[in-house]
């Protein structure tokens, strides 16, 4: 495990304060999984935590941006978003099938009352954090 440097934008914490209590807890859990995975992923020494499109976002130097959010128009779910033009979500779908619920090629969706398959999700996060290193491999090296 490497020492991880986290560059934090203070607006992220302000954004977390705007979520309803149960949602905030769910998104805080996703945030913890992202940072934990970054610390455990070889070659990821720094991660930037910022806002993109008003959503908490995470970016590693050789990775693809990961965003997390909850939308009031879909109050029963929250999501982790990946770049829709990448091979990430199609690969997750192929490797993990119905372990996850997907939104097109851009997100993994979670119900408020469901469990998060942590090991599988951390694997997906690790692929996103090193995407530019693995994007040429079949199934991103999976």
Image: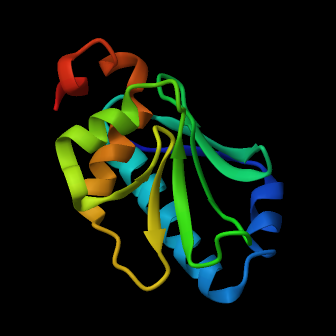
Question: Residue 10: image x %, image y %?
Answer: 81, 56
Q: Is residue 64 left or right of residue 102?
A: right
Which residue sits at x=20%, y=49%?
96
Of the pair 82 and 57, the residue shown nearer to us = 82
Of the pair 47 and 107, the residue shown nearer to us = 107
Q: Is residue 1 visible?
A: no
Question: Residue 51: image x %, image y %?
Answer: 76, 47
- Is 64 located above or below residue 35 in the figure? above
Coloring scheme used: rainbow
Which residue sits at x=78%, y=75%?
17
Q: Quadrant of residue 98?
A: bottom left
Q: Quadrant of the C terminus?
A: top left
- Is 89 located above or below residue 67 in the figure? above
Question: Residue 52: image x %, image y %?
Answer: 75, 42
Which residue sits at x=30%, y=20%?
134
Question: Residue 42: image x %, image y %?
Answer: 30, 33
- Is 68 located above or below residue 39 in the figure? below
- Is 89 located above or below residue 71 in the figure? above
């Amino acid at each position: 495990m490497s020492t991880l440097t986290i560059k934090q934008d203070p607006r992220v914490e302000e954004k977390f304060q705007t979520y309803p209590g149960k949602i905030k807890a769910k998104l805080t859990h996703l945030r913890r999984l992202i940072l934990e995975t970054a610390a455990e992923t070889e070659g990821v020494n720094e991660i930037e935590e910022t806002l993109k499109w008003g959503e908490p976002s995470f970016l590693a130097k050789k990775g693809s941006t990961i965003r997390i959010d909850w939308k009031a128009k879909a109050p029963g779910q929250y999501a982790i978003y990946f770049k829709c033009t990448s091979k990430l979500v199609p690969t997750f779908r192929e490797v993990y099938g119905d372990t996850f619920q997907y939104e097109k090629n851009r997100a993994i969706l979670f119900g408020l009352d469901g469990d998060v398959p942590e090991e599988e999700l951390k694997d997906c996060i690790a692929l996103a954090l090193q995407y530019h290193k693995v994007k040429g491999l079949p199934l991103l090296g999976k």
